[in-house]
Image (cartoon, rainbow, N blue to C red):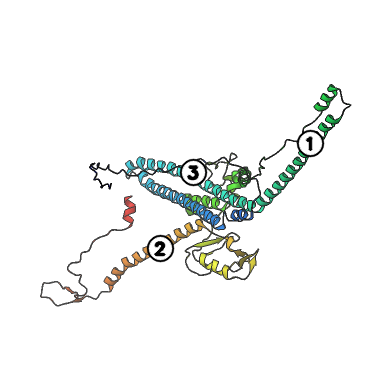
């Protein structure tokens, strides 16, 4: 009997709105506990260790540290420049206040100066501390590079030597363990086959006299001193060694810190201030910067570290105004950066494996390499002040010439008189080119010195 297909009478149920599928992100589980390596480094591992910290990374870190110190130094110079300029302005106004001019402003201006001096002092101390921390960070970066280079040379050899020692120890212990088991087996066999030994006490004494062999290692895993332990241990010893040095040894001989001190001193006193104190006086016995030291205690010539000197604003190579002066660490001469470095790059002479030239200044016999030159921030500041003063003198001379020029033309102007009727005064005839245009207006701009008088 054939069956006919039946039609379903069930009503379709409305579909439920689809919910957005929530994908659960499984967080990575905690790392397993650290296990020391059981085998020495493979050649592939040693190759990866050699490239874990490249020279480019070290140069980048050193460059960033130098930039940070330079910015901190420039900021310290800027705020101390502002304080010195405010102090000079108040000093000029004191003369007027003593004469009774605007005496009511004195108390307010003196208070502002006092607050600014305290704020600049506090900020300078913080910047000095930041410079020392940046120097420490730079030393830490060099320690990392040194320790990683040491690991590259020594880690593989040390792990191989330790592994061979452990394997030799394991083999020795295994042999002793085997020998101990064989000895015990032989003794048991002798006891079983010895018919004359009837005394139980003697047997017990013999059993008690047996000594077990060394602790069997079995499947016990060998543990070696890994790279992490070597790195941490050597870094800690290097850090403690560095921190054992005094602040005097760490910073007073550091070129970056010396530059910071020179810039702050130059910004505080300008060109007419006392010489920079000796580096031996920069820190107290506790290591902190010595408070209040701004000048030498005595006037001995031997105590002067940086005296006033005649500064030239022109390069002895290009004879042009300095843009980026580089100073020598061996002689008191400075040069334009691009010019002196180009001379060194073209030189065929080498000193200690580096290209070198004789100082371009006539009479100086010092041999200079690129590492013997540095950016002298104090010299840059002095040159900028001198160039600014020269520009102001040029502007003043130009203004004086402009002031005297109209008087000269007026004195040489040729006036002609015309005949006028009786009773009228003669009148000078002026050409149309000498007459000012109708829309022009003469305004008295005053004397630039009036602004200083108003202050």
| Mark nearer the N terminus (3 vs 1) | 3
Residue sitting at x 61%, y 66%: 356
Query: Residue 297 location, x and y as percent?
Result: 57, 45
Rounded to the nearest whole Å, what is the CA distance between mark 3 and mark 2?
Answer: 34 Å
- Report, in whole angstroms, how far the alpha carbon at label 3 lies from the one at label 1: 73 Å
Left or right, 101 with reference to 33 = left
Count how many numbered circles sit on residues in the image. 3
Label annotation for residue 125: 3
The quadrant in which residue 412 appears is: bottom left
Tell me what residue is drawn at x 45 percent, y 44 percent. 123
Q: Nearer the viewer, residue 123 or 331?
A: 123
Residue 420: x, y in percent? 12, 76
Viewer-nearest of labels 3 and 1?
Answer: 1
Element at label 1: helix
> In this view of the protein, which residue sits in the foreground, 102 or 264?
264
- Do the CB atoms of the residues marked 3 and 2 lie less than 8 Å apart? no
Point out which mark residue 180 bears.
Answer: 1
């Amino acid at each position: 009997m054939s069956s006919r297909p039946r039609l379903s009478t069930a009503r379709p149920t409305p579909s439920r709105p689809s919910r957005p599928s929530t994908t659960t992100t499984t967080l990575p589980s905690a790392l397993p506990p650290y296990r020391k390596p059981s085998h020495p480094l493979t050649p592939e591992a040693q190759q990866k260790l050699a490239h874990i910290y490249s020279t480019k990374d070290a140069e980048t870190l050193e460059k960033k540290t130098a930039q940070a110190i330079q910015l901190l130094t420039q900021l310290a110079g800027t705020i101390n420049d502002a304080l010195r300029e405010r102090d000079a302005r108040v000093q000029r106004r004191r003369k007027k206040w003593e004469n009774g001019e605007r005496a009511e402003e004195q108390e307010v201006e003196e208070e502002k100066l006092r607050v600014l001096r305290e704020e600049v002092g506090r900020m300078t101390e913080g910047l000095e501390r930041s410079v020392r921390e940046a120097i420490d960070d730079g030393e830490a970066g060099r320690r990392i590079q040194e320790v990683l280079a040491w690991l590259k040379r020594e880690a593989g050899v040390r792990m191989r030597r330790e592994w061979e020692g452990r394997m030799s120890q394991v083999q020795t212990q295994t042999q002793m363990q085997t020998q101990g088991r064989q000895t015990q087996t032989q003794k048991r066999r002798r006891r079983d086959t010895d018919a004359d030994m009837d005394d139980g006490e003697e047997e017990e004494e013999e059993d008690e006299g047996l000594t077990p062999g060394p602790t069997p290692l079995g499947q016990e895993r060998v543990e070696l001193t890994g790279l992490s332990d070597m790195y941490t241990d050597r870094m800690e010893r290097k850090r403690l060694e560095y921190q054992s040095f005094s602040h005097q040894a760490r910073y007073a001989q550091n070129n970056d810190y010396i530059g910071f001190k020179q810039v702050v001193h130059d910004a505080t006193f300008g060109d007419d201030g006392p010489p920079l104190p000796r580096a031996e006086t920069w820190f107290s016995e506790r290591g902190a910067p010595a408070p209040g030291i701004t000048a030498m205690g005595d006037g001995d010539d031997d105590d002067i570290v940086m005296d006033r000197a005649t500064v030239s604003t022109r390069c002895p190579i290009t004879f042009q105004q300095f843009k980026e002066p580089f100073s020598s660490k061996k002689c008191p001469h400075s040069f334009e950066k691009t010019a002196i470095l180009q001379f060194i790059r073209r030189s065929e002479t080498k000193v200690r494996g580096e290209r070198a030239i004789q100082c371009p200044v006539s009479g100086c016999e010092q041999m200079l390499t690129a590492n013997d030159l540095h950016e002298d921030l104090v010299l840059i500041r002095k040159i900028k002040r001198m160039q600014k003063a020269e520009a102001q003198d040029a502007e003043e001379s130009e203004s004086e010439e402009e002031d005297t020029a109209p008087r000269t033309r007026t004195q040489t102007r040729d006036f002609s008189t015309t005949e006028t009727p009786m009773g009228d005064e003669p009148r000078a005839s002026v050409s149309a080119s000498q007459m000012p245009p109708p829309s022009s207006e003469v305004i008295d701009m005053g004397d630039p010195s009036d602004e200083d008088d108003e202050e």
